């Protein structure tokens, strides 16, 4: 797509709207057999969200250990000090995975457990021991470890001393941490993700300033310091180069023996035009470019999307020739975290509040409502609605833009609307069924998707929402930490066994729960 920020074409083309009107049939059934035999079904978590044990066995403080202690930042002032105590209960949790019958477990490594103070500190042997035990036990149960090196939490020192991802120092720091991971775990880990959702981190931490280090400027937020127009671009630049350095180390030093696959995970909302107008269709394209292609184009093509360069001009950092070489082709797969779809309104030729008129937002605004009607059935999370067609559409987009590079859906998940019985979670079952139907359709059309991970294995610390937002297949009692399978865990287990256990009962109880 070519787009010129200054010369926006006004012509309204007669492009059919029918694609957008396509809906899934409600309650379409899905079978395991709709996916290839070697397809990877799994469940996902991340270190800060489940591990707890925040100071156990030599772990250092992470940015989230510190941020959550600032009153008012997190719902109920909750924190991950204990979380699900997965650090101590991992054996029990692997039993849960085993009983689900999943083939992969996606988890992340706590950077501050391995390097309490970053690379200038001493590595913590107990941290290495913990992940070795976790990985060994997974492997002994036939569960493939799918390991994210960095998922949001980093040693607090790297934020306090170096400024977090705003600093180019983080590139070396990350490469060093990744090297330790490859060296110690790479003989058993075949799937590596360098960084989880750099695009969402750039947004939440440096545009809106609601994640640490809480930097932003008006109109995006009221932080004590920061620059929402520029800093996210710098943070992303550093994350991408850090990724490239880690991949280079992996491929040159470890791959010859270990022969694994290395990729990155993108937050991947799908976008649809708010109005049936060309300007909103172009804005929806732009939303994909300014969110998803922002992080993926450099890793496939060696540079940022042209439309971003046109809009940001000199504010968008440049890659040197060497950096371009480092980045181009630096992923074996794309990890896709897909939950929902948003409407997009153009802000070049319409007045938009709250930053929609700024390049960092791609001159657009997003919303979940058209004429007061939500884009899909509501969930328990205010910005996530059930829009199963979005799965097929985002996969199609990535397939087209990146020549069908292998993809994994590394996260897809659901929270029940308030007041519903958490254990009888028909809404979650119907959500996953509908999204899987949509994914299967994309695969039938030729998309190179290799796996699907449910977020999450169990209820956990959901960042700003603390423990009020439950994404798990297993319910976790906050007093006792006891794990109880929800109906969705039973459904997932029977789906994976390819039988239709309880399907009829579940579908009728679920009537009207999920629409396409
Ligand atoms: C994406 C993030 O990777 C994960 O940490 C988070 O909990 C889920 N989305 C749900 O919001």
Image (tube, grey):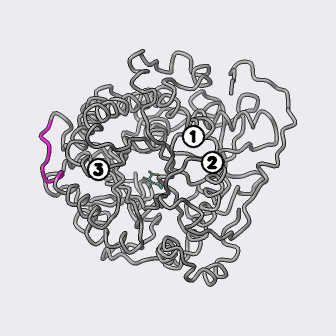
The answer to whether residue 153 is above or below residue 424 is above
Return the x and y of residue 471 as percentages of the image width and height: 47, 64
Question: Is the residue under label 3 in contact with that under label 1 (CB below 8 Å)?
Answer: no
- Left or right relative to 30: residue 221: left
Q: Quadrant of residue 439?
A: bottom right
Eye-nearest disc, 3 or 2: 2
Question: Residue at horizontal 64%, vertical 54%?
Answer: 444
Q: Residue 191's mark?
A: none
Question: Residue at horizontal 69%, vertical 38%?
Answer: 284
View extreme (right): residue:
14
Return the x and y of residue 78 as percentages of the image width and height: 35, 60
Q: Is residue 496 magenta?
A: no
User: Residue at label 3?
Assistant: 109
Q: Report how far apart the C-alphas of labels 2 and 1 lie in the structure.
A: 9 Å
Eye-nearest disc, 1 or 3: 1
User: Residue at label 1?
Assistant: 404
- Left or right relative to 228: residue 96: left
Query: For this rendering, which residue is in front, 424 or 156?
Result: 424
Question: Is the residue under label 1 in contact with that under label 2 (CB below 8 Å)?
Answer: yes
The answer to whether residue 86 is above or below residue 402 is below
Quadrant position of the C terminus in the picture:
bottom right
Q: Earlier in the sequence, mark 2 or mark 1?
A: 1
Q: Earlier in the sequence, mark 1 or mark 3?
A: 3
Q: Earlier in the sequence, mark 3 or mark 2?
A: 3
Query: For this rendering, which residue is in front, 514 or 366?
Result: 514
Q: Which residues are magenta?
A: 121-128
Q: Residue 446's mark?
A: 2
């Amino acid at each position: 797509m070519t787009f010129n920020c200054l010369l926006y074409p006004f012509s309204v083309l007669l492009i059919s709207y029918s694609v957008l009107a396509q809906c899934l049939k409600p309650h379409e059934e899905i079978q395991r057999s709709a996916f290839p035999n070697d397809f990877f079904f799994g469940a996902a978590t991340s270190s800060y969200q489940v591990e707890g044990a925040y100071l156990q066995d030599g772990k250092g403080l992470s940015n989230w250990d510190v941020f959550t202690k600032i009153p008012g930042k997190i719902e109920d002032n909750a924190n991950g000090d204990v979380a699900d105590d997965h650090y101590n209960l991992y054996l029990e949790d692997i039993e849960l995975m085993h009983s689900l019958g999943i083939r992969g477990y996606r988890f992340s490594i706590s950077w501050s457990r391995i390097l309490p103070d970053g690379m200038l500190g001493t590595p913590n042997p107990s941290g290495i021991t913990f992940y070795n035990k976790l990985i060994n036990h997974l492997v002994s149960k036939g569960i493939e470890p799918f390991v994210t090196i960095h998922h949001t939490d980093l040693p607090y020192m790297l934020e306090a001393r170096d400024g977090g991802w705003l600093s180019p120092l983080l590139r070396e720091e990350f490469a060093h941490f990744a090297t330790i991971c490859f060296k110690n775990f790479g003989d058993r880990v075949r799937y590596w993700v360098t960084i989880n959702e750099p695009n969402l981190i750039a947004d939440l931490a440096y545009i809106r300033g609601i994640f640490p280090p809480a930097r932003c400027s008006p109109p995006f937020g009221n932080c004590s310091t920061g620059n929402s127009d520029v800093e996210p671009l710098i943070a992303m630049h550093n994350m991408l180069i850090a990724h490239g350095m880690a991949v280079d180390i992996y491929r040159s030093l470890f791959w010859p023996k270990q022969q694994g696959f290395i990729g990155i995970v993108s937050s991947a909302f799908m976008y649809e035009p708010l109005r049936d107008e060309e300007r909103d269709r172009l804005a929806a394209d732009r939303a994909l470019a300014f969110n998803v292609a922002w992080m993926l184009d450099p890793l496939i093509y060696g540079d940022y999307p042209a439309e971003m360069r046109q809009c940001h001009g000199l504010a968008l950092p440049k890659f040197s020739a060497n950096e371009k070489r480092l980045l181009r082709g630096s992923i074996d797969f794309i990890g896709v975290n897909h939950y929902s779809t948003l409407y997009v309104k153009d802000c070049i030729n319409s007045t938009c509040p709250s930053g929609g008129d700024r390049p960092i937002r791609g001159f657009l605004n997003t919303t979940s409502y058209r004429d007061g009607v939500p884009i899909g059935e509501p969930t328990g999370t205010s910005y996530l609605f059930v829009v199963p067609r979005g799965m097929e559409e985002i996969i199609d987009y990535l397939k087209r833009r990146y020549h069908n590079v292998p993809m994994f859906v590394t996260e897809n998940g659901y929270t029940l609307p308030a007041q519903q019985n958490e254990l009888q979670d028909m809404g979650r079952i119907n959500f996953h069924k509908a999204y899987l139907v949509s994914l299967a359709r994309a695969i039938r059309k030729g998309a190179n998707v290799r796996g699907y991970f449910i977020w999450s294995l169990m209820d956990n610390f959901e960042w700003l929402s603390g423990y009020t937002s439950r994404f798990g297949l297993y319910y976790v009692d906050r007093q006792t930490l006891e794990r109880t399978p929800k109906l969705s865990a039973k459904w997932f287990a029977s789906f994976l066994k390819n039988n239709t256990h309880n399907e009829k009962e579940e579908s009728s109880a679920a009537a009207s729960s999920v629409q396409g």
